[in-house]
Image: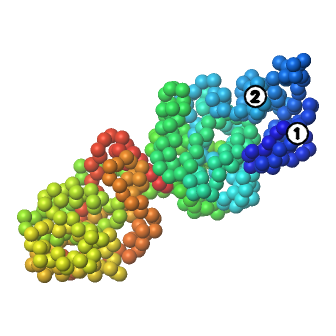
Amino acid sequence: ISSQLGPNPCFLDGEKLSRGQSGKLSHGGTLYLVNQNHPFKLHYSLSSNGRGSNSAQKGLKAADKTKGEREGKESPSSPTPKRSIRDFFSTSPTKIAGFDIDGCIITTKSGKVFPTAPDDWKILYPEIQPKLASLLKKGYKVVFFTNQMGIAKGKLRPEVFKSKVEDILVTLKLPVQVFVAAGPGIYRKPVTGMWNHLCDKANDGVTVDKKESLFVGDAAGRPENWAPGKKKKDFSCSDRLLALNIGLQFYTPEEYFLGWKRAPYSLPDFDPRKLDSNARLYDPPSASLTSIKTEVIVAVGFPASGKSTFFHTHIIPKGYVYVNRVSAGKGLDKRTPTLHAHFYLVFIVCHSKCNNQNSGRYVDVAKAAGVPCRCFQFSATLEQAKHNNRFREMAPSDTKHAKVNDMVFHSYKKHFVAPALSEGFSEILQIHFVPNFKDSQSETLYRQFSEG
């Protein structure tokens, strides 16, 4: 009796079994594992005690070897042949040839940007299989690295994607190691989590030679019309950035498989590798961060631009009292009688045309109390703030931050109006993001491109 568990149908001779269906196979019958491919003949005999003989214990013997397996590594004792990546490689090479999958190894048969069904795929170029085979002969391990956010979002079942990858490997007839980032975080390209896992835990302890290794992917930051034929702009630069983060040679599929010349490309505006940990903290340098007199400081900047860290590090230890928008609210005026006894920090998340009256309210309260009101404008750009946001989601921390989605960032940028002295501020300081990493691991993570 055979039961179909996966999403792709199998056949018992001519009988089709869909998910959840079962059927019987007689002696001499043929089981086709996926659709009508990969035939396995059933042979059995009974001994005098009613149990299967030694020859029967060999189970199903493949009429055609499972493609992708090494000669002689078939497991005849198992009635359900297994394709374990551990069976593919007798040794773990020092040279890695890494590839993205979608848009690099495969494309859709339908011509759509996204597949319409699990079997809506085909090998992108006929040159791919022989090129990969040549790499194996040269001593490389071929590894696929793919982002599949649809799994985390519930739009793609893991078993469906696993079956699809298995079908791709069957078509290629080659041993390939596959890593899948099923959601956000350190494993999602261009962050190097999948590569690190390969090197640390999935290469049998063999050190990878990055100088001899390479990575190929279609998310390369190429502009619109990067080649004749009205080529579309790349949706991302994550594959090229992964190679940059690791330190690998990088190629697009057209460059590597077809021999095309290198296409133009652009990198993100914010490069975390170039951030200076010893840069000046604020401008103008002649200004003072704190005062010996009572004052109000209004903070303006993107979410994740470093406001909280800056004030808790440099300002609050000097005796300032923190008042955020939520705790201040309409009750800020009630604090006025005691304002002279404290220094106040007020955070403004969005200083815009629509609500710069918020800062005006704080300025008015300061004036009513007879104290100055300064503005600290945090200079982190949109790209840097989004990078900071991703970093604090990935990095271990004792401080919890609410996740900020892209809509909030872009809304801030759209409505932002730079603060001006004409609003009543006594001084405006530009505060620069100067990181102070708690350890080398945090710095290594921060200095990686985190999104393409």
Image quarter of the N terminus: top right
Q: Nearer the viewer, mark 2 or mark 1?
A: 1
**Which type of secondary structure does the marked residue at label 2 adopt?**
loop
Q: Residue at x 55, y 42 (%)?
A: 215
Q: Position of residue 175 (x, y in %)?
A: 67, 33
Q: Quadrant of residue 31?
A: top right
Q: Is residue 61 above or below residue 21?
A: above
The quadrant in which residue 418 appears is bottom left
According to the picture, the residue beneath numbered tag 1 turns out to be: 24
Find numbered disc 1 in the image and state the secondary structure of the residue it sits on: loop
- On screen, 355 above or below 388? below
Label 2 or label 1, whichever comes before in sequence order:
1
At which x and y percent is residue 97?
Answer: 58, 37
Q: Residue at x 53, y 35 (%)?
A: 198
Q: Residue at x 45, y 64 (%)?
A: 405
* Residue 345 relative to residue 14: left or right: left
Q: Which residue is mark 2?
A: 78
Query: Which is nearer the eye, 351 or 174?
Result: 351
